[in-house]
Amino acid sequence: MSPRFAPVLAGSFLLVALVACAGTPPASAPAATPVAVAVVPTPTPVPVPTPTPDPTTAPSPNAGDVDESAGGPNLSVEFPGENLLDVTLEDRRAKAWRVVVRGTGDHATDRLEVVVEAGDVGPEITATDVEQGEVVATIDLSAYTDDTAAAGGCHQTLDVCVDGSSFRFTDDGSGRLRIRLQMPDPSTRPLLVTGGTAGWPGDPFVLGPWSDTEAFPWGE
């Protein structure tokens, strides 16, 4: 081979080598392996209850009255004879007492009302006849210890009478009053008997509100 052809051959081999390198794709880099990241949950705050103060309860007027000294009217009924009632009303704080006999049914607006009120010398006692809601008559029984005083009084439609000589009023601090009532036949005329008392919450001889007892049913 002639020496002048050597460079040409050498150039040819270089070109092949370059083409071979250009035609082979580069090796791809290995895919990255995903790394697991631990997720720590955010703690949920636990509500802390706010302490609530105990409600303050206002004491009742007789909260310290453990022996029931505040009291109130007490009504008791005894039967000394046929169609007779001994009604006793007691309230040691009372300055006035009343016993009321009410009708029922067609006579629901009729009543006999006996009121006893403390006075300077003695009690003042009146018996009032009320019919259909209107005052028909009033009898003064204050001198019940006097033989010349009115012996009592009767209600015209209810057939109820009060015996003036039966009054028993004790001024010993017990606040006890007793009166006797002549009642009609219980099978023919049912009636209701209630009691009530009032005091002097402010000025003397100025009555405060009345407090009434439950009714005693006559003839029911």
Image: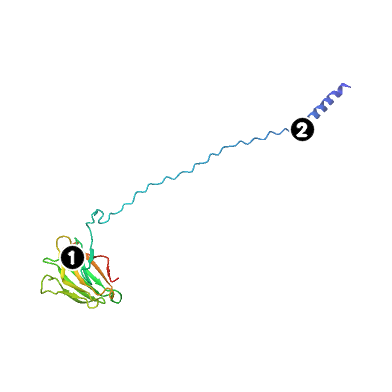
Mark 1 touches mark 2? (CB < 8 Å): no
x, y percent for residue 169: 15, 65
Relative to 41, residue 84 above or below: below
Q: Is residue 111 above or below residue 42?
A: below
Instruction: Assess disc 1: are there few (<14), some (14-19) or many (≥20) residues with their C-alpha within 10 Å of its C-alpha.
Output: many
Distance from disc 1 to disc 2, alpha carbons, whole Å, reads 135 Å
How many numbered marks does the figure carry?
Answer: 2
Q: Position of residue 34 (x, y in %)?
A: 63, 36
Q: Amino acid at mark 1?
A: Leu
| Quadrant in which the N terminus is drawn | top right
What's the residue at 76%, 32% (across, down)? 22
Q: Position of residue 78 (x, y in %)?
A: 22, 66
**Residue toward you, 72 or 49:** 72
Picture quadrant of residue 187: bottom left
- Residue 124 position by quadrant: bottom left
Residue 159, position in %: x, y? 23, 76
Mark 1 or 2, nearer chain start: 2
Q: Which residue is mark 1?
A: 177
Q: According to the image, label 2 marks what residue?
A: 22
The image shows residue 152, relative to residue 88, as above or below, that is: below
